[in-house]
Image (cartoon, rainbow, N blue to C red):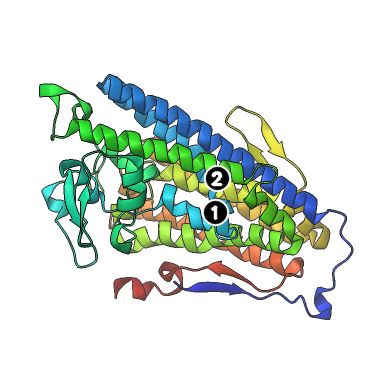
Amino acid sequence: MSRLLLVSCASTALCALPALATEKGDILGTYADIAEAAYGDSLVAAEALGDAVAELLDAPSADTLATARQAWLRARIPYQQTEAFRFGNPIVDDWEGKVNAWPLDEGLMDYVDPSYGGATDENAYAALDVIANPTFTLSGEEIDATEITPALLRDTLHEADAVEANVATGYHAIEFLLWGQDLNGTEAGAGARPWTDYATGADCTHGNCDRRGEYLRSATTLLVDDLAWMADQWTAGGAAREAVLANEDAGIDAILTGMGSLSYGEQAGERMKLGILLNDPEEEHDCFSDNTHNSHYYDAMGIRNVYVGSYARIDGTVVSGPSLSELVAESDPDVDAALRADLDHTMAEMGRIKAVAEAGFSYDRMLARGNSDGEALITNAIDALIAQTRSIERAVVALGLDQIAFQGSESLDDPNAVFQ
């Protein structure tokens, strides 16, 4: 993957900075407090999802499936705001694939439409369908999957055979199990898995309803466990908090690296521009549920949260404190003002996508070839993300920091390579 490199002028006389009143340690404390709160909220929401899944499996019905889906949608709101902690914090990067890996080959888990196809050169297990197969061969080894347990998903299936598309755990595995495939392409409609896929006896559709329930329960259990672990890393004495606080300059770098990489390479590039280039609804981030507009919106909000040092919790309280914005403003008020304005502009563009999607023009419909209105909505948001990334670059220079590398994306840096 390409990289967008930032080079500061820290070693030149032009970058001599005045003494700063805002303490870096206080800023990093706020940053860690926001992480603790956001991962804590993600855990609470995942536990509520687990309760809803238990109700679905105990008493399958259209209503309990709808309740579980709503719980999944609510769980995405705090989690997406944590993605600004990726890229700059190795402990998060090393863990993130367990909970938010995407895209995935859903045929690994369950039945799929015949149009999906089967095994490919890239992934021999793209249509393994473990729910229908209590035993199977994986990388030359006979696997006993008579019971679908968290350990089976975590230790055997997830990224099986070192293939990243073999996503067996996390939000998107659960999303697929709740919604099923979205077979509508760029037409209206999300996945439409029937509640009877979890029914008992003669009401069961598509077979193996008990095993499908085991998979859903195990995946939800793992999500809760993984979020509990990460939330703990940001509490007092936790490894993530201690790592950020250990070196003030490195901690500030981590904030800016997370902001810039998520803004540019990840969100503007891989999650948005790639879909526009390919006109492919499979490039939606939440493709089964048609929730991509919210994922994009709350990702952008998470970037803004860490810069301004404020996070609104799901219980209505606000975690806030000394911010990176204050530090930048002391060095160069114009740079801070421009960055804050760019962050606000990005939120406005994401808000337009969100509002239009909620009115019925879903994100996958925006991706349709020849849909100029949808392309304009997405492109305006991409442009806003790129503009805010340039302002983040200027903040790096204003603070006199050493070279920082942001994640890049072929979709932005070399679009022709996408089609090769």
Residue closer to the observer: 201 or 177: 201
Q: Amino acid at mark 1?
A: Val
> Residue 412, percent across and down?
45, 69
Q: Amino acid at mark 2?
A: Met
Q: Residue at x 46, y 30 (%)?
A: 47
Residue 123 placement, left or right of 245: left
Q: Is residue 252 depicted above or below 42 in this figure?
A: below
> Residue 83, percent across and down?
53, 50
Q: Residue at x 76, y 66 (%)?
A: 399
Label 2 with label 1: CB-CB less than 8 Å: yes
Residue 224 at least partly seen: yes
> Residue 374, percent across and down?
37, 51
Secondary structure beneath disc 2?
helix
Residue closer to the observer: 411 or 75: 75
Write down the quadrant of residue 161 in the picture: bottom left
Q: Is residue 202 depicted above or below 190 in this figure?
A: above
* Mark sitting on residue 210: none
Residue 102 placement, left or right of 280: right
Residue closer to the observer: 356 or 53: 53
Alpha-carbon span between mark 2 and mark 1: 8 Å
Quarter of the figure with the C terminus: bottom left
Residue 148 placement, left or right of 313: left
Which numbered disc, 2 or 1, marks the residue that appears first in the sequence?
A: 1
Secondary structure beneath disc 1?
helix
Residue 353 at least partly seen: no
> Residue 61, percent across and down?
25, 21
Number of labels in the image equals 2
Tell me the residue that label 1 is attached to.
92
Q: Residue at x 61, y 46 (%)?
A: 233
Q: Residues within 10 Å of mark 1 (few under 14, many from 20)?
A: some
Q: Residue at x 14, y 46 (%)?
A: 113
Tell me the residue that label 2 is attached to.
230
